Image (cartoon, rainbow, N blue to C red):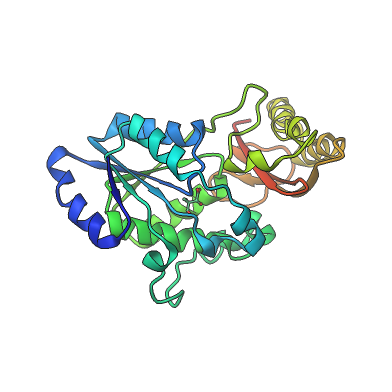
Amino acid sequence: MQICKTVTEVRRTMADLPAQGSVGLVTTMGALHAGHMALVAAARADHAAVVATIFVNPTQFGDPKDLEAYPRTEDADLAMLKDAGVAMVFLPNASEIYPEGEETIVETTHLANILHGVVRPGHFRGVATVVTKLFNIIQPDAAYFGEKDYQQLAVIRRMVTDLHIPVQIHGVPTVREADGLAMSSRNIRLVGHERSDARVLYQSLTVAETMVKEGKTVELVAETIRDIIGSRRAATLVGLDIVDAAAFAHVTGIPTHPIGIMIAVQFKNVLLIDQKEITP
Ligand code: PAF
C-alpha cells in the first residue's frame, strides 16, 4: 500500500494505477470503523484499485474545539486499510489541500443551507470544497459515501451533476452496532449513560418507519420522534427533518412517495446524526 502525503506523490502513484483498471475512492477523516470498511469493500467489489484518503478537513468544522477533539488514530487506520487491500492512501496536511487559503470554494447553494445545514452553517460548503479537491487530485472513476450522512450524499451527488465531474457516486447502507446505533467516529465521545441513551436515535427511526408504513401523517411521526428522544435526559433533539427523498423538500400529511427522515441529537460532547429512507 502506497502512502502519499503530497499531491505530487499522488499524481506520480496514480499514473501507474490505470494500467490495473478502474479506481474507486473512499474519502475519510480517519478514526476508521466498520462503516468505513463497508465503503472500502463496496469499492473493492467494483474496481481493480481502491484509493482512500484520510484528512480531517478543517473547513467543515464550525467549532474549533470540535475539530481539535476529532479522534485521530492514524496507525490503526493505515493497518485497517492495508488489510482491506487498499492500493494507495492519501494523507495530506491542511496546507497541502489549502495551500493558498480558502479563496475558491464549492457550494451547493440551496442544499447546503437547509436542514442540517442550518444546524451546522458552512459545514456542507467545506465538505463540497474538499471533496471536489480530492476528486481533482485523485481523479477516480467512482467514489463511495455512507448513506448515514444523507444530506452530505445528496450534496455530493448534486455537485457532481452540476459541475460535470466525471465520477460515479455510490451510497452505501449504514453499518450499525448490535443495538442499532449507527457506527461513527464520534461515538467514542459519548460518556457514561449517554452510550445507552444514544440507542434512542435508531429506536425512534424504527418506530417512525412502522408509522409511515401504517399510513400515519408526518406530523404525528415527528411528534412521536420528539417524544421518544425527549424521554432520554442526555439527548437533545436539535434537528428533525422529514423530506421527500427525491426533491429534499419538507413533506406534510400522509406521504405517498419515498421520504427521508433525518435527525440530529446533541449529547454533552458530541452531535450525532442518523437517517432512514422509507417507502410508504
Ligand atoms: O464523511 C466524511 O467523513 C467527510 O465529510 C468527508 C466526505 C471525508 C469530507 O471531509
Q: Is residue 262 visible?
A: no
The N terminus: image quadrant: top left
Q: What residue is at 65 percent from the left and 44 percent from the top?
A: 273
| Up/down of 224 relative to 107, above or below | above
Residue 225's spot in the image, x, y percent? 78, 37
Number of marks drawn: 0
Q: Is residue 152 left or right of residue 117?
A: left
Q: Quadrant of residue 215?
A: top right
Residue 206's spot in the image, x, y percent? 70, 27
Q: What residue is at 85 percent from the left and 36 percent from the top?
A: 232
Residue 238's spot in the image, x, y percent? 76, 51
Residue 105's spot in the image, x, y percent? 45, 71
Q: Is residue 183 left or right of residue 268?
A: left
Q: What residue is at 24 percent from the left and 57 percent from the top?
A: 9
Determine the residue located farthest toward the left in the rendered image. Answer: 19
The C terminus: image quadrant: top right
Q: Is residue 123 left or right of residue 200?
A: left
Q: What residue is at 64 percent from the left and 39 percent from the top?
A: 188
- Front-most of 204 and 66? 66
Q: Quadrant of residue 257?
A: top right
Q: Is residue 175 visible?
A: yes
- Front-most of 123 and 222? 123
| Up/down of 109 relative to 261, above or below | below
Q: Quadrant of residue 260?
A: top right
Determine the residue located farthest toward the top in the rendered image. Answer: 178
